[in-house]
Image: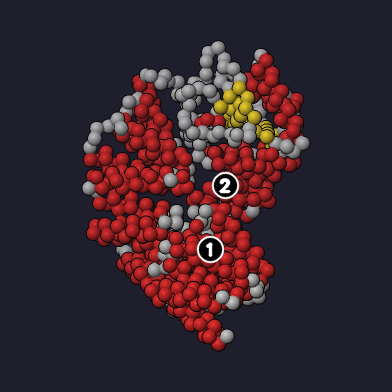
Amino acid sequence: MARPRSVVREDAEATPSGAAFRRALADIADALRRAEEGIGSILAVTAAAEAGRLIAALVHSPAAAGFSVLRWPQSLLPPLGGPDDLEAVALSLLPLADGHPDEARRNIALTAERGGGELAGAAVRGLLGLPSHQPLWLGLDGAQRADFQVEGLAATMLDLCYERPVLVVVENAQWARGLTVPLLNALANAVEDARLCLIAIRSPASCVRPGGWTPPVTARRLLLPEADGGPADGGPAGAGTEADDPAPHAALLEALRRDRRPERIEWMAHHAPLAGEWALACACARHAGRRAEADCRPADAVRLYMAALSALDRLPATRRHAQRRIDLWTALARTQAPADGSAIKAAERAHALAEDLGDPMRTARALSILATLRWVGGNLPAARRTGLRALRIWRHTRSPRQQVQTLVNLGRGLTEAGRFRHADTVLRAAADLIADLPDDPAHRRETRHLHGPIALAPVCIAAHRARCRAELGDPQEATRLAHAALAQAEDGGHAASRAMACLHVGWAALTAQRYAVAVEPLKRAVAITETIRLHACQPLVLGALGYALARTGALNDGASLLLGSREHARMLGIRRHEPQILIWIAEAALLSGQPDDTVRNARDAAEKAAGAGQAGDEAWARLALARGLAAQGNAAAARHSLEEAARIATRRSMAPVLAQCADLRKTATAG
């Protein structure tokens, strides 16, 4: 984003003439009047060379007189030496706050906290260069921080516009990039109930870069005629070059080589192909893609990695270039959204290319990412098979750090599949590998942080081992491991790891039927996941707490949390957690004297668990179903379900399930 202008200082230009401009100004004036009354809207304006005259006429019009005007011009390339996208937005808000600059910074941060919570306030403090001492903020991952930066700025905008209506003009919206896009989406989702008018101006030029920000379909569309000279130039401001002449681009590249500002890499990635420098274009796009990925700008990373692939198409077919192609498809698997299947397709492409090339390290890397993506998608059998293939290669190539990554992913998947003994062995091997690594801080730091999971590696290992030991009937060791996971999470300061560890402290207690002991750590897990918006964990921790409360007598509170956790899991599409949540709902229904609900939910859980290959959940679901059927008086069906639960539990060495099956059998016989 170019440096925004919060208060318009330019002299007013002559009002554009022509019926189209007059209609556009009238439509915008009408939108401003409605925004002043609290009914905000978005206007999508397509304009070329006359856009500047329209903006000048607009911001000096009587309709905008009562508005705070924010101009957020977008640029094709990042400004060299300037603030990043969200920093620029945060700075643009300072004139809207009272006081001298330092006081204005503090007021804007307080506004973000008031509207979005402590972490949103901490995020905006960071964008404004103020220190934050919020412990959870210091323990967030980069992606989580980025989410709170967007949320904090959106909350600030929505709060400020209650005092005075705000007009936001997004110039060259087709060039919006980075975190500006999710910020604009957040504002678009809330604009209808705010004193806010958002005008997005896009160029009709065919040479604009793909992507940018497209207003929602609900936005009002306005089309302004092009000037006689045609559409505005699609190149970056200040470039002063023609797209078909490589010489100026080559000269710019030479100057950029001597520049040391980090943004120069994206400039070089843009100009290198225009100069015909395809090897440099590939290298710079890859470098800029990695920078965007590290800065939690996945859309920019995808665009740059794709540009690098396009540059590779212009280069000769060599083994090194084939390896670069594999690395780029692997990077795309990391950065593309898993939901639409593009990430899995990229990982499969990387794997196929690596196998064709006979490159074992790259084959294993692609398989590891593919296993993680399949686990996220709930395909546990495929994730297990893929992880085992990757592990065999890592062992053969003696790559201990990569083995740790794959072992943790594999152990986690085996745990969810109910293969508790195998999972415990795999996770123990991962812990041994970490202990044997050289005592090099950088070496250990790289291994501690996993690609994909939400927790630090040692925490993930200890937490999932705790669940395994609990399911295998070793409650003391389960408790020890869960508390060890929590201690490591506290020591590492990683917020998501604390939530995972607290969950498993509570889960181990639930499995051991120590329900009162489970309540406090689960309450803490819920508080952390809600505060840091850890959506992947929220359904499970809510369900676990709901079940613990139901078991300790708070049936209404427990039922409310359990039903909320089920809806949350369905809304997020987290299928692998749904059977466990349904089991807890079924057991709580029995406590409330509702055996019909128990049977319905337990049967649903059993079917879902069996279909997903989650044998552990299926065993618990069959046991809950047997209890519900027994309570209904259906003794024959209850015995059948009980035997199914015992059969699975015997095969998976699930001692707590076997013990409870025996207790239910005795109760049924005595009855």
Q: Where is residue 351 in the image (x, y as percent from the top left)?
A: 31, 48
- Residue neighbourhood size for the residue with mark 1, other residues' Cα within 10 Å, grouped as few (<14), some (14–19), many (≥20): some
**Residue that extends furthest to the top in the rendered view of this protein:** 228
* Way the structure is coloured: secondary structure
Provide the secondary structure element on which disc 2 rests. helix
Q: Name the residue under label 1.
A: 604
The disc placed on residue 149 is 2
Residue 293 in view (yes/no)? no
The structure residue drawn at horizontal position 45% and vertical position 56%, both measured from the top left corner, is 378
Q: In this view, does 343 lie to the left or right of 566?
A: left
- What kind of residue is marked 1? Asp
Q: Is residue 171 above or below residue 335?
A: above
Q: Position of residue 174 (x, y in %)?
A: 52, 30
**Residue that extends furthest to the right in the rendered view of this protein:** 37
- What kind of residue is marked 2? Gln
Q: In this view, does 521 lie above or below 172?
A: below
Quarter placement of the C terminus: bottom right
Residue 232 in view (yes/no)? yes
In front: 613, or 24?
A: 613
- Residue neighbourhood size for the residue with mark 2, other residues' Cα within 10 Å, grouped as few (<14), some (14–19), many (≥20): many
Q: Position of residue 316 (x, y in %)?
A: 24, 32
In front: 584, or 326?
A: 584
Q: In this view, does 114 lie to the left or right of 384?
A: right
Q: Where is residue 387 in the image (x, y as percent from the top left)?
A: 34, 58
The structure residue drawn at horizontal position 68% and vertical position 43%, both measured from the top left corner, is 158
Going from N to C along the chain, the mark reached first, 2 or 1, is: 2
| Distance between mark 2 and mark 1 Cα atoms | 40 Å
Q: Mark 2 and mark 1 in contact? Answer it, CB < 8 Å.
A: no
Q: Is residue 202 left or right of residue 351?
A: right
Provide the secondary structure element on which disc 1 rests. helix
The structure residue drawn at horizontal position 49% and vertical position 66%, both measured from the top left corner, is 606
Q: Is residue 533 left or right of residue 64?
A: left
